[in-house]
Amino acid sequence: MFAQVVVLAQVGQSAGKEAVFDYIVPDDLRQKVSTGSLVTVPFGSRRLYGVVMALTHETGIIRLRPIDSIVDPVPVLNPAQVALAQWMSQSYLAPLFACVDTMLPPGIYGFADTEYALLEDTVNLGEISGIRGQLLNLLTERGPMEARQIERALSGRSWRPVARSLVRDGVLAQTHVLAPPQAQAKTVRTAQLAPDQDIESALAGLRSAKYRTIIDFLRQEAQPVEVSWIYAETGCTRYHLDKLAERGLVTFDREEVWRDPLEGQVFKSTSSPALTSDQESVWESIRHAMRDSEPGKFLLHGVTGSGKTEVYLRAVGEALSQNRRALILVPEISLTPQTTSRFAARYPGRVAVLHSGLTQGERYDTWRRARRGEIDIIVGPRSALFSPLDRLGLIVLDEEHDGSYKQEAPLPYYHTRETALKLAEHTGATIILGSATPSLEATMMARQGRITRLEMPNRIMGHTQRIRDLQLRFNVPETKFAAIENGPPDARFCPLPPVHIVDLRAELRAGNRSIFSRDLQLAMDDALSASQQVILFLNRRGSATFVLCRDCGHVMTCPRCDVPLTQHNTMQGQLVCHHCNYQESPPARCPECGSTRIRYFGLGTERVEDAVSERWPGARILRWDRDTVRSHAGHRAILDRFVAGTADILVGTQMIAKGLDLPFVTVVGVISADTMLNLPDFRAAERTFQLLAQVAGRAGRGLLGGRVVIQTYHPDNYAIVAAANHDYAAFAKRELAFRQRHGYPPYRRLARLVFEHTNTRRAQDEAETLAASLRDLMAQWGRPESDLIGPAPAFFARIRGRYRWQILLRHDDPAGFLRNVPVARGWRVDIDPISTL
């Protein structure tokens, strides 16, 4: 038997090439190795980890080496994942090992490394200087060291060429090592009463009452108990337990425990409410498909608050009734707490959460439980798509339009929507793409009949219990409800909130230089006086977005990136680069002309927060952006505080625009709708429309309705007008006409090729050379449907000291075309990029 193995290391695998290597399966492993197994194999002079992609009884290679060992007795990939990894490699021109690695939890295999040891004790270190001397001194002091350890000790210094030279000279010995997996099961120490012991005799001479307390507690438990729990319940210490063990009364053992991020959380159980007419119609279509032999693919276009989540919950219930499992994807980690709560309340004990914000142990244990079939529903962002769920019956991609579903680093640069559709094909699962503002790609798929479009145009205020809860909170008589009755008797619909567009040019002409228009100030005054909540949205962090000299016009920029530095008041006024995190103190004088007329321009969430405090000093304010929240626990904490009513105003970036149900918010203010509108990216209008429509949907989900104020210098822009009118159809019609005219997705597909180098001339030469080769091949192959944009400097021409040039390829099948093109090493190839910036 032979195994085709992809080694989990960069070993010359080229983009889009499967690069699997054949090995003999030894007789003693034949019953253990299967497709998807994690193994170790010899590779040149090294040993590497790898995953078996296929087993065969034939091979065209005469001399083969055997597999060394199997790491895990259970396959780490199921057959659907093996097929999906191969598809991803071909479709996104990514090395197969990177696609496989994306599907594995961190720490499941160890790193291959190189160990260096000093061979000659007689080296006169006093005569050696520079990096050579530093390396030899290090190895003399510490003994043999792995490359990763040396990298930390000599950070920023080019020591590897020196090490290779010393190996050639016979000064150093080089050994390839393979570290064991870091991820391990967690065990705890347990204790229990030993059977058939004369307790009274054994306790003789022990004066402390704690010994009797321990015995009574263990007798009551009648099973092994974690020792930390014994300490907590009895007040004893390790000394007391050891004394009892010496006398044969207590035995110790170790027991495996699961690290569950949801442990200790209580979810109030809920039942299924009656469906509205919109929900009923949509649910019937989905239910029939899930019971059919042919799984369905659906685009669920429902306005914000239309009840899409209830449809998802029903679909999950249908999957569970068929003994199948469900995967619920959300675009951001910040959305997992609310989504998890909804599903765990309906299906208690059957839900797990999986994302990069968990500890390595939590991710490993959740992955193992899913592989063992002990989890029925997983909630998480894009990485959760690769959970090893067998018998997958349902995939939900909520907020499918969101750009966070595109993986931009590291490899592979996949899009979750397309990958989820392919996974649904491999598993026979039904897939639902849900959004209030569907991507134009999804809309086009529906028009072409590749997926079925379902619509829910009405917003639900709530069912009876929710309405009563809101009545109690706001003390609102039923006659004041901002809603109309519809659907089942216990549900009410409410209109989407009215949106007012404020022309900031007119505000300036009227003498208002505040960042808050008069209309927004009045709306906030009314809401705060009535003890209601307000959301203020601005998609920029910081206090000032650039710092400028009023005399010579010099802008403070990052020395490593061609981007302006952003001022952050919460960091002692530091100027920060949002790309490489370079920081410097604000200058007292201009570094170019020496002028003291330094001014701070632009607007970020920090400055908005400060301005709110000045204008409404009694208001309780929360800020939600990447500067205030860096963990999943932080997201939950801010959301819980705001929902509990401990804050009046929430200031935030796009985190607050995504899928949050905040019934006490009656006013939403968009401080500036122009931040993304004029970027040199073909998706700028679509992103602006989606963000504005989504953030507007946070208002008016309670009894008193709500209102939205959008501030802009472009009040007539079609994206802004369509968002204000809640008119997706009008926006899609206008934007699709623009895309078709210029050959942009969804009518053509794109590939973005970016080359980076520390030398600007080298970067430009490489880009021009590749562009010339691509144009020659297009002419040679007669591909009039293909064309190039560029080469040209990227929008940020330098990041972290590296100059960037890019080429955009428009083609019906860019991956298929580029698989036949010799693209030089160093190019980043992104198929179907979410942005051209």
Image: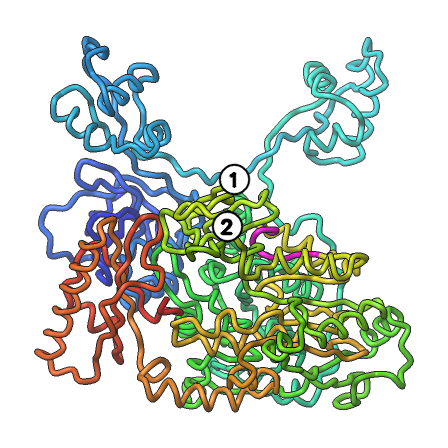
* Mark 2 closeness class: few <14, some 14–19, many ≥20 residues within 10 Å: many
- Residue under label 2, please give it: 368
462 relative to 134, above or below: below
Look at 35% across and 88% down and name the residue there: 740
Residue 241 placement: quadrant? top right
| Mark 2 element type | helix
Residue 167 placement: quadrant? top left
Q: Are marks 2 and 1 in contact (CB under 8 Å)?
A: yes
* Mark 1 closeness class: few <14, some 14–19, many ≥20 residues within 10 Å: some
Q: Of callouts 2 and 1, which one flags the residue occurring earlier in the amino acid sequence?
A: 1
User: In the image, is residue 628 part of the stretch drawn in magenta?
Assistant: yes
Residue 266 placement: quadrant? bottom right
Q: Nearer the viewer, residue 545 or 238?
A: 545
Q: Nearer the viewer, residue 69 or 40?
A: 40
Total marks in image? 2
Look at 74% across and 18% down and name the residue there: 240
The percent position of residue 149, horizontal first and vertical second, equals 35, 29
Q: Amino acid at mark 2?
A: Arg
State whether residue 317 appears in this view: no
- Residue under label 1, please give it: 185
Q: Whole-Å distance between the Cαs marked 2 and 1?
A: 10 Å
Q: Which residues are magenta?
A: 622-629
Q: Amino acid at mark 1?
A: Ala
